[in-house]
Image (spheres, grey):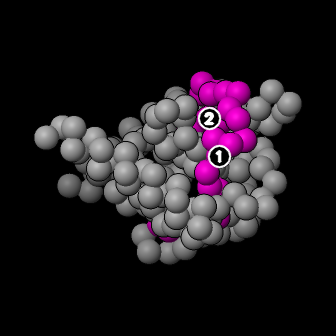
Amino acid sequence: MEEKEEKKEQGQMLDIEQLLKEGRVLQLKPQGYSMYPLFVPGRDEARIAPIGTHTLKRGDVVLYRRDHSILVLHRIVKKNASGIYLVGDNQAEIEGPLREDQMKGILIGLVRKGNYVPVSNPLYRLYASVWLALRPLRPPISRTIAKLKRLGRKIKK
């Protein structure tokens, strides 16, 4: 049973890559908390386009495949001759260098509570640049935000 589920899961990942290769724009629900607070699992969705002619740069959020592993959505910290370096918005540790061929798609917008926000939106751009600059401080900031939200929910009760 586990084997079938694993094959199905791998097939779904391959389908995402195939759809992007065909030029399709996809809307996916990111799982996990590596891109929190940009994406809240179960609530927010990412609109991903094929890399195509996009020139990848610092601050872009890309969908990439770790070697022989999973698809991951993270932000570019830097790009140089060695490769591309990425980090999740809720992480401090940088991953890389990664190869250009590992990049499968690029974030063009997000859907939060039914509202579409393109990455060209000035508020999104401000968030992206500030959050990237605060990379070393992000984990404690995220923990503080989570505690404040829990406190707010307790007060509402």
Query: Measured from the top left, where is residue 74 in percent x and y?
Result: 59, 43
Q: Quadrant of residue 80?
A: top right
Q: Nearer the viewer, residue 68 or 89?
A: 68
Residue at the spot 68% in from the left edge and 43% down from the top edge: 101
Residue 87: assigned label: 2
The residue stretch that appears in magenta: 86-112
* Residue 62, visible in the rendered structure: yes
Query: Measured from the top left, where is residue 149 in percent x and y?
Result: 38, 47
* Residue 141, visible in the rendered structure: no
SS at circle 2: strand
Residue named by callout 1? 103
What is the three-letter code of the residue carrying label 2? Answer: Val
How much space separates mark 1 and mark 2, taking CA atoms?
14 Å
SS at circle 1: strand
Query: Residue pushed farthest left?
Result: 1
Q: Nearer the viewer, residue 24 or 61?
A: 24
Query: Measured from the top left, where is residue 110 in percent x and y?
Result: 55, 64
Residue at the spot 60% in from the left edge and 24% down from the top edge: 93
